[in-house]
Image (cartoon, grey):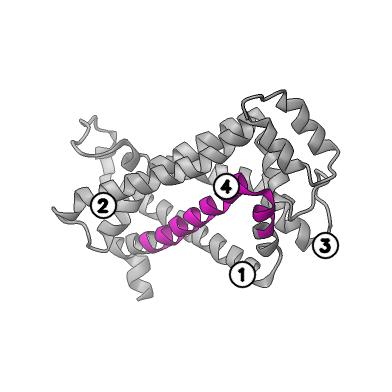
Amino acid sequence: MSCFLTNSSLGKKLVMSVSGAFLVLFVLFHMSMNLAALVSADAYNAICAFLGANWYALAGTLVLAAGVVVHLVFALILTLNNYRARGAQRYAVTVQEKGVSWASKNMLVLGFIIVAGMALHLFNFWAKMQLVELMGEHTNSLGLSPSDGASLIAYTFSQWYYAVLYRVWFAALWFHLTHGVWSMFQTVGWANDTWYPRLKCIANVVATLVFAGFAVVVLVYFFCPCLREAAMATTAVSGAAEAVEAAAGCCAGC
């Protein structure tokens, strides 16, 4: 089995499909968790506390990291194999194939943008939450409790550059999912003349739900200072609170 998964193109694509399905499920879970921050800061912080430096959260983090690494490595291998297989033809000027989406031709580039967004997200959240707990600290660099995710969201998305960068990340994820979701079903043999358009529709729906679910949190916290102030109200934070208030202004419509 190991030879099949590593030595054949179909095996590599199967690994990509399985790891991709796992990552899609995590993204959907993460999106659902983030939406809780719009309903109740306390509820979101309770989730953050539950997913702190506990053994099950750490085990999940390691499994997730392994899934990302496997998906990225096999994507690079498949791309290099396809590049070599084309030989001199890769320099030829070709006409855009009918039915081939832009996303399908730029999956690796989109993947690198997504990885860059993950690095930014790890810096903004994981390094100030779970990592802080692992180091035995009680506050992060912003003076926040590592389980106070609501205040961290409020601070991060009050900064315009983070609001822009995260939306670029979500857009790349949307394009990646529109091709990746139906492609993983195709790899396991579920795509035929009947199911192909259905799977394309499912992929677009999943990608749009993910984009909208993540983006709405960023936009609401960026444009609604009242919500940001409410999220920060229960925490005595000097630097972060002042930065949020300075960026907030007045929002009579919130």
Q: Which mark, residue 118?
A: 4
The reply to whether residue 84 is visible in this rendering is: no
Q: Tell which circle, 3 or 4, labels the residue nearer the N-terminal end.
A: 4
Q: Nearer the viewer, mark 2 or mark 1?
A: 2
Q: Are marks 1 and 4 in contact (CB under 8 Å)?
A: no
Whether residue 25 sits left or right of residue 40 in the image: it is left
Q: Is residue 12 above or below residue 2?
A: above
The residue at the point 67 percent across, 64 percent down is 50
Residue carrying label 2 = 199
Image quadrant where one finds the C terminus: top right
Q: Specify the segment rendered in magenta.
A: 17-46
Q: Position of residue 209 (x, y in %)?
A: 42, 45
Q: Secondary structure at mark 1?
A: helix
Residue carrying label 3 = 136
Q: Tell which circle, 3 or 2, labels the residue nearer the N-terminal end.
A: 3
Residue carrying label 1 = 59
Image quadrant where one finds the N terminus: bottom left
Q: Amino acid at mark 2?
A: Leu
Q: Position of residue 180 (x, y in %)?
A: 35, 50
